[in-house]
Image (cartoon, rainbow, N blue to C red):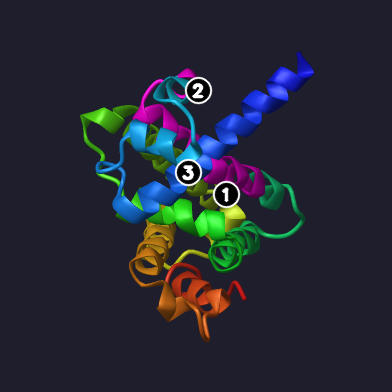
């Protein structure tokens, strides 16, 4: 039984790896599950046994980056220090992952630049939107704490600050996916994050 489970997991990973390669090259809408099956040397039925449709497959790719981000978020929030410095460390960790982890780069590129969220991918789109809303809501809640709120610029509310942090994140991710070369030399995530934080918080450094 254990061997069967291990073999099934290896098959699933092989399918996800093939999907990642093909989605990155051709785009999600122009890649069929049959093509993914051929790329792994499997039958289409074998792919459908693990993934009922393309939406399910995209969700699994999302999990490979969303779950680590959620874990890192919890780890940083459990650390000692101010909320602002915890958020700073969190964003630096996420942005540095773009430079150091190829799979993270590939999946973000697929989700941001190679994927059309049509009805076929409705569950994936809903999950992505829910993640964004939860992220903004959680950040707004943290920034609303009196000690952190006292560091906000006078014309910025906790809700606006949380949205600005989301805009910073998606802006960097989108621009990186658009042209990775601009981040290959002289890229300094700390400078970028500090510039955004200075527009939101005062006397935090």
Cα distance between the residues tagged 2 and 1: 44 Å
Up/down of 89 relative to 114, above or below: below
- Element on which disc 1 rests: loop
- Position of residue 86 measured from the top left corner of the image (x, y, whole percent): 65, 58
Q: How far apart are marks 3 and 2 (CA)?
A: 14 Å
User: Dot 1 corresponds to which residue?
Assistant: 145
Q: Earlier in the sequence, mark 1 or mark 3?
A: 3
Q: Does the magenta stretch include residue 104?
A: no
Q: Position of residue 104 (x, y in %)?
A: 53, 55
Left or right: 19 as drawn, with respect to 115: right
Q: Would you place residue 120 above or below residue 142 in this image?
A: above
Secondary element type, mark 2: helix
Residue 50's disc number: 2
> Which region is colored magenta?
49-73
- Mark 1 is surrounded, within 10 Å at the Cα level, by few (under 14), some (14 to 19) or many (20 or more) other residues, namely few
Judged left or right of residue 18, residue 126 is: left
Q: Which of marks 2 and 1 is nearer the N terminus?
A: 2
Q: Which residue is drawn at 57% across and 49% down?
A: 145
In front: 115, or 19? Answer: 19
Report the residue that reaches farthest toward the bottom: 186
Q: Earlier in the sequence, mark 3 or mark 2?
A: 3
Q: Residue at x 48, y 22 (%)?
A: 46
Q: Residue 94's x, y, as percent?
A: 56, 59
Quick one: quadrant of the C terminus? bottom right
State the residue position of label 3: 18
Left or right? Give the position of 82 relative to 102.
Answer: right
Does the magenta stretch mainly form a helix, a strand or a loop? Answer: helix
Q: Does 63 appear in magenta?
A: yes
């Amino acid at each position: 039984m254990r061997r069967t489970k291990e073999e099934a997991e290896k098959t699933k990973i092989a399918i996800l790896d093939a999907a990642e390669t093909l989605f990155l090259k051709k785009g999600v809408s122009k890649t069929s599950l049959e093509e993914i099956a051929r790329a792994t040397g499997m039958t289409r039925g074998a792919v459908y046994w693990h993934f009922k449709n393309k939406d399910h497959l995209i969700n699994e790719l999302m999990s490979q980056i969303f779950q680590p981000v959620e874990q890192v978020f919890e780890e940083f929030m459990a650390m000692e220090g101010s909320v602002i410095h915890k958020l700073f460390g969190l964003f630096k960790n996420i942005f540095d992952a773009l430079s150091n982890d190829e799979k993270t780069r590939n999946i973000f590129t697929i989700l941001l630049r190679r994927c059309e969220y049509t009805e076929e991918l409705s569950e994936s789109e809903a999950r992505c939107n829910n993640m964004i809303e939860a992220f903004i809501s959680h950040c707004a809640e943290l920034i609303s704490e009196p000690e952190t709120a006292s560091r906000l610029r006078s014309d910025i509310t906790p809700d606006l600050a949380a949205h600005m942090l989301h805009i910073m994140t998606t802006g960097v991710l989108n621009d990186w996916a658009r042209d990775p070369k601009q981040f290959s030399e002289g890229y300094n995530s700390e400078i970028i994050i500090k510039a955004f934080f200075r527009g939101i918080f005062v006397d935090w450094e």
